[in-house]
Amino acid sequence: MNLSQLRRAMRETDPAMSAFDPLSRILFHDDFDAGLNGWTLMTGNYERSLGTLLPQQRDFRPPMLSNLTMWDTGSAGSLHGSYAMKLATRPVPGSISVGIKRMTFTEPVPIRLEAWFTVKPEASRMRLAEHDVRSFGVFLDLQDNAERVMPHLRYANATGGAGERKWQYKRDRPATTELSGETRTHFHLGPDGWLDVPGGGQRLCYNELPTKQNWHYLRVGFDLVTRRFTELRCNDRVLPHGELAPIRMPAWPNLWQMLNVGFWVESDVDNRSFLYLDSVLLSVERETS
């Protein structure tokens, strides 16, 4: 048995790890039973005064831990344990909750992000409310010595009470505000500029009550060298990725070798929307295995 076969055998006998299909080197495997593991609020940039925060970013909600307690069923816990990371919006249309993990990369190689998630509106109404969640998504924020690259993907669930149920990506660069010579800011999670993933329509399991949830598998691949998507998968659907493109811009000051990972959820109505993450894994393909 060679080294790669041994690694696979070890993963397949671990109940938590066998839920993933990582590349050859695992950078992190966050099971939120062990806490938030460095995930935090993505606050907007500011300089000298909080008044320089962009208006759209002043009320981003931070991540928290949750045991998924519901008023009728009690505490369900997460997929693999007791706690999940919870992103919860305000009960305001367009409110966003976002969580980010910040790190750097050691070599430009292909990366793979995997997660088990579930999404629901707050069970505050005695109806299904499947159109209360406007969208949820995942993004990467990457920079080398020349360019900042931001792959963005979202699942557009509903707008104005009408279901959409499709995957989208964003490639247009958002407007940038200069705060100083070293600090800039932009609002890259806004509603503008989203493009449909070709063939990206997908119905997700929602179940029959607002207090029921089913866990979903998500996988996103991206190559740090070619700056292209290499895969997009949700549950059984392997979605076309050949036409997908990230947001690209010249390198910003102080962000060298940045490798950030983020998730967010957005409400469409005056009810809170929740995105729960049971666990998240980021892996890379070694140049030499």
Image (cartoon, grey):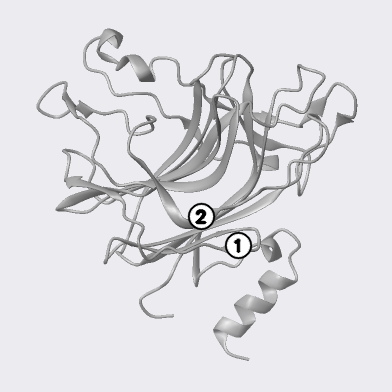
Picture quarter containing residue 191? top left
According to the image, label 1 marks what residue? 237
Give the x, y percent position of residue 60. Answer: 46, 21
Quick check: 188 above or below 196?
above
Marks 2 and 1, how far apart at CA: 9 Å
Q: Is residue 162 left or right of residue 78?
A: left
According to the image, label 2 marks what residue? 200
Residue farthest to the left? 181
Q: Is residue 94 left or right of residue 71?
A: left
Q: Residue at x 35, y 76 (%)?
A: 287
- Marks 2,1: beta carbons within 8 A: no
Looking at the rendered structure, the secondary structure element under dot 1 is strand
Location of the C terminus (image quadrant): bottom left
Q: Which amino acid, by three-letter code, is at mark 2?
A: Gly
Quick check: 236 above or below 130?
below
Q: Is residue 80 left or right of residue 118?
A: right
Please state which of residues 33 and 75 is positioned toward the viewer in this rendering: 75
Looking at the rendered structure, the secondary structure element under dot 2 is strand
Residue farthest to the bottom? 1
Location of the N terminus (image quadrant): bottom right
